[in-house]
Image: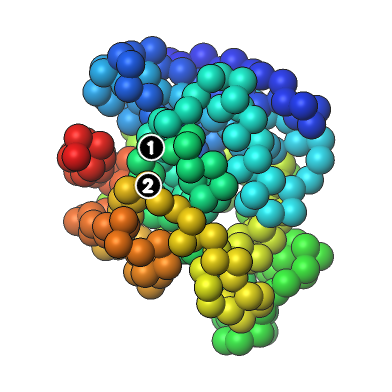
Amino acid sequence: MDFPVKTIKLSNGEELGYRIKEGGDKKLLLIHGNMTSSKHWDILMEKFDKDYTIYAVDMRGFGASTYKTPVNSLKDFSDDINEFMDKMNLTNVNVAGWSTGGGVAMILAADHPSKVKKLILIESVGTRGYPMFKKDQTGNAIAGEYLTTKEEIARDPVQVLPLQKAYDNKDKATLRAIWEATIYTHNKPDPEKYDEYLDDMLTQRNLADVDYSLVHFNISEEHNGIEQGNGKAKSIECPVLVLWGENDLVVPEQMALDIKKDIGENAELVYLKNSGHSPLIDNLDQLLDNMYSFLRK
C-alpha cells in the first residue's frame, strides 16, 4: 500500500510534505527521525489499527518538505508541526516520535498540551540532548570535549562527513553499510523497500543543522555539559510511553532512563526485546502491541 505525499504551505514560507492513511475517528500523528522522512513509517501505517486515521509529516529539510530557512533547534521543527496541526485541525491527538522525532514530539507536548493526548517515544533522543565529541587521530571520541558550533559539527570526520559525502554523491552503498552497522541490527527491510528507504535518505538537506539541534537540546533541569536545561520536560502532562530496544546502538539506555526521570510519574519505560534503533523493521508486531496497549489505557 502506498501513501502519496501531499504538501501544505506554512506562514514561514516552508512547505511540509505529509502522508495520510484514512481510518476511524481516533488520530495518530507520526514524527520521523534523522536520515528519514514520513516514508519510513509506511509499514507501520499499513498494519496499524483501522480505527485510527494516521498522519505522517516530513520535517523541514526532509522528504518532500522545503528547506528555505535552516533550523537552529528542535523547537523550529516543533513549531512547524504545530502550525501543520492547526491547518489540519488536529487537536488532542496521539503523537509518536522516533529518534530525533521523539525530541520534537516532547517539545510539542510541553508547549501545546491541548494538542497531545498521549505521547509515544520510540528510541527517542534523551531529554538532555545527544552530545557529539571531538575525535582523536584514530577517530575515537574524546570524553568531555564537546562539539558545539555548526562549523565544528559539519567537519566531524566520523558522524557527519561520511554521511554528508554519501548524500552528496548519492552513494546508497555507503548509506546501506552505515544503517546495517548501526540501525538494522536484527532484520532488514525487503530489497525493494530497502531501496526506497535509501532513496528517501538522500532527500535530507539539513544533516549538520539537525546534529547541532540535538547537541543543544536540553529540556531537563540538569546541565548537560553544554548548557543548562530549560526544565520543559516537567511541562509534559500527558501519559508518555518510552520504548527502548535492548540492542539500540544509536541511543543508549541512559537516554531512555533520563526521559522517564525528567518527565516524571506520567512516563513509563518499556524495553523491546530483539530490537535495535528501528523496531519498525526489527520487530514491528512487538512495537504495535506496546503501542496498542498504551493507547487503550
Say which amino acid is labelled 1.
Lys
Residue holding disc 2: 238
Residue 136 is left or right of residue 114, and the answer is: right
Between 77 and 186, the one nearer to me in the picture: 77
Q: Position of residue 243 (x, y in %)?
A: 31, 53
Q: Position of residue 168 (x, y in %)?
A: 73, 44
> Vertically, is 75 above or below 23?
below
Quadrant of res 152: bottom right
> Vertically, is 245 above or below 17?
below
**N-terminal label among 1 and 2:** 1
Quadrant of res 131: bottom right
Q: Can residue 245 be seen?
A: no
Q: Mark 1, residues whose alpha carbon is within 10 Å: few (<14), some, or many (≥20)? A: some
**Marks 1 and 2: CB-CB under 8 Å?**
yes
Residue 38 is left or right of residue 6, and the answer is: left
Q: Quadrant of the N terminus?
A: top left
Q: Secondary structure at mark 1?
A: strand
Residue holding disc 1: 117
